[in-house]
Image (cartoon, grey):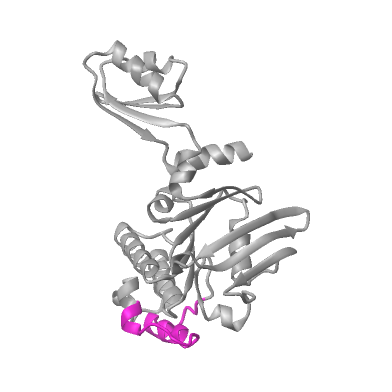
Amino acid sequence: MDPTMETIATLDSVSKRYGAVLALDRVSIQVRRGEVLAVLGPNGAGKTTAISLLLGLLQPDTGSAQVFGEAPQSLAARRSIGAMLQTSGVPDSLCVGELIRLFRGYYPRPRSVADTVALAGVSDLLPRRYGTLSGGQQRRVQFALAICGNPQILFLDEPTTGLDVEARTTLWKTMRRLVADGCAVVLTTHYLEEAEALADRVDVLAKGRIVAAGSVQQIRARVAQRRIRCISKLASEAISRWPEVRSVARDGERIEIVTDSAETVVRQLLFEDCDLSELEVQRAGLAEAFVEITREAA
């Protein structure tokens, strides 16, 4: 069996309720070795609850959660997990170097300090006290702490929030390296271009249920929407009145058209503008598919 297809963590038909609110309703999720699974959904969809169950921070009301065949809260499971959540209990008074050495001590086979620092890009922060760092700098340190134990499964909850372009690029590069080495990554993000760039598979949650699952290409293929770009002298107002057109935007001489019937619109464009040039037709991106799928679920 291909080791990258090995399932190492699961939610099996789990439900979780907070009082009268049903946060998850019979949700099943599989995390496979050596891939990035993006768990996407609007606010309140149940993403944080699902991650908390896989981390052992919550217990399901029904169904089961397992990591490497163990309960997520067991010591054996926790020693295989790294996590970067939106909130952290990192001591403000310790220096970054001290924090990395402290967190490494929780794991049986941690990364070296030098390797951790290089992968997370925090060499400039080592002598600084955590409490004096900016929000973006703290996120970089939290990423270092999440990977210092050499985890086999890494949970990243909105990891690039507050990061500048350079830090985000470093994190993306490191994620790809970890996955290539066999680590599984579970990613939640509101930056859908991030999920599109990094994810091997996507689970879309809405109202506590999985409403779509598959590769990025499979999720995009669920939406008929196409984006047409071209250079045309036709008036945007006239194109917007065509029945198959959802929206039209002009940037100088370039036009971008969103439609569910690309063939019909392209034929009309070519018929009405013999000088039309630089014609491109693209399938809907993950962002458009996400909006359409969650709208249908609502």
Which one is in front, 56 or 250? 56
Residue 43 is situated, as x and y percent measured from the top left of the image, at 58, 50
What residue lies at 65% left-to-right and 47% top-to-bottom?
207
Q: Residue 240's quadrant in the figure?
A: top left
Residue 248 is situated, as x and y percent measured from the top left of the image, at 39, 24
Question: Please, is residue 29 above or below residue 117 in the view?
Answer: above
Q: Is residue 14 visible?
A: yes
Q: Can residue 86 be seen in this view?
A: no
Q: Residue 271's quadrant in the figure?
A: top left
Quarter of the C terminus within the rendering: top right
What residue lies at 47% left-to-right and 45% top-to-bottom?
218
Looking at this view, name the residue that lies furthest to the top. 272
What residue lies at 59% left-to-right and 70% top-to-bottom?
55
Is residue 297 left or right of 140 when viewed as pictured?
right
Looking at this view, name the residue that lies furthest to the right. 20
Question: Please, is residue 138 above or below residue 208 in the view?
Answer: below
Residue 23 is situated, as x and y percent measured from the top left of the image, at 69, 55
Is residue 54 left or right of 94 when viewed as pictured?
right
| Residue 92 covered by magenta stretch | yes
| Residue 251 covered by magenta stretch | no
Residue 255 is situated, as x and y percent measured from the top left of the image, at 31, 25
Which one is in front, 158 or 172? 172
Question: Please, is residue 82 above or below residue 230 in the view?
Answer: below
In this picture, which residue range is highlighted in magenta? 90-116
Q: Residue 281's quadrant in the figure?
A: top left
Question: Please, is residue 32 above or below residue 269 in the view?
Answer: below
Is residue 37 left or right of 229 when viewed as pictured?
right
What residue lies at 47% left-to-right and 16% top-to-bottom?
243
How many callouts does the rendering have? Answer: 0
